[in-house]
Each structure stands twice: as structure tokens, then as C-alpha cells.
Image: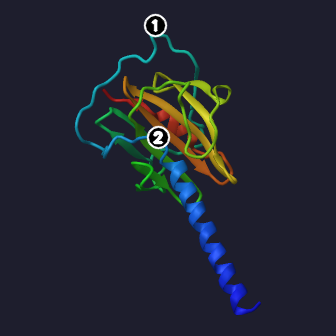
Amino acid sequence: MNKKQLIITIIIVIILAAIGGGWFWYVNNRGEQVNPPVTENSGQGPQDSSNTENNQLQGEVVGSPAADVDMSDWLTYRNEEYGFEFNYPADLLKSKNEYYITVLSNTSANININILNEKLNPDTITSLIGIVTKESLEAVIVGGKNSYRFRDGDMGYGGNSYRIPLDYSHTLILWFVTAGGYYDNEDEIISAFKFIK
């Protein structure tokens, strides 16, 4: 390959990388607005006592801890502003990034946590990566509230994504991401999820 062909190849690679980066930015910033900094143990926010018009639970209660899972050393993730908490394995490190207010992760899994400034509505649920259809939504009960679960991911990574109503204008995202598509301790985490106010 001569010098001219090498330069053309490098330019094409740079252009493709820029297009790919622009597409990634667009997909990740197209409408899911997060509530600016939600931190643990701070403030008080409005709380919704029900999330259905007739106050009836409508879905499968999900999450049941396996008898052989030792949860005695697990940590507690707590958000006092929106009034919820759940337990998670101590080997998950806590961080945040530009897309999620909290990411609990180790070398094999992420639990992505975010707060959306919108009421939970199955007709408007979106995903940063995949396509969400009404048929792909499963009505579930998490923490005593009607919620939704769906499979989300792309290119071999993903897992169950939950949308849980916090109040009349905020929705919680809990997205379990692994290379295999299923996080071993998901049921235990979901069963430990509770509202604290």
C-alpha cells in the first residue's frame, strides 16, 4: 500500500468513527431526560401513594431470593429524595456516568440506575439501545407498585430493564446488563426493593 492509499484509508476510518460517535451520542441523548443530580440520602421529593387509577395491582410479583444466596454482606442502595432502597452484592462498585446517576458494576455486570422526569406510561417507554414495543413489556409488581420489565440490549450485552413509578412525574430505571443477558442476583435485588416513605 502506497502512502496515498494509506492516507485515504486513515481519513475514511476517521470519518466512519465520527459518524459512529455522532450516532451513539444521538441515540443516547434523544429524549430521556434525567432529573439533575439525584443523590443518596438527600432531600425529600413528592411521593405517589398509588400508580393506577383504581389503585389495583396488575402484574406478576417479581423477585424471590434463592435460598442458597448469602445476602448477609450485601450493601444498601438508598435514595431518600424519591424514597426507595434495595440491597446489592458488596462486590459491585458504585460510580456514575453521563447516562446514569448510579452504576453498580463489577467485571461481569452493571446495574444502571436513572430517574426520568416523566410519569410511567407503557405507551411512551423508550430504550437507549433497543426498540421497545408494547408487546415486549411485561407488567410486573416491584416494591408493591405496578411496573414494567422488558429485555433490553444490543450486540450481546443486555438484560432485564425495569421501569418503576416513583411518583406522578418521575420513573425509575433499573437496568441489569451482562454479556450473557441475565444477572444472577437480579431476583434477590428486585425482591429487596422497597419504598421507604
Camera-side residue of 89 and 136: 136
Type of the residue with mark 1:
Asn
Most extreme residue toward the right is: 1
Q: How far apart are marks 2 and 1 (CA)?
A: 30 Å
Q: Nearer the viewer, mark 2 or mark 1?
A: 2
User: How is the protein colored in the picture?
Assistant: rainbow
- Which label sits on residue 54? 1
Residue 141: give x, y in percent of width and height.
53, 23
Residue 143: give x, y in percent of width and height.
46, 27
Most extreme residue toward the top is: 54
At x 74% / y 92%, what residue is drawn? 2
At x 45% / y 33%, what residue is drawn? 193
Please tell me in which quadrant of the rendered image residue 77 appears: top left
Quadrant in the picture for the C terminus: top left
Q: Position of 48 compared to 185: left or right?
A: left
Please tell me which of labels 2 and 1 falls first in the chain.
2
The residue carrying pointer 1 sits among few (fewer than 14), some (14 to 19) or many (20 or more) residues within 10 Å by Cα, namely: few
- Which label sits on residue 31? 2
Quadrant in the picture for the N terminus: bottom right
Residue 156: give x, y in percent of width and height.
69, 53
Q: Is residue 18 above or below residue 152?
A: below
Please tell me in which quadrant of the rendered image residue 50 appears: top left
Q: Position of 43 compared to 110: left or right?
A: left
The residue carrying pointer 2 sits among few (fewer than 14), some (14 to 19) or many (20 or more) residues within 10 Å by Cα, namely: few
Q: Position of 48 compared to 21: left or right?
A: left
Camera-side residue of 106 and 25: 25
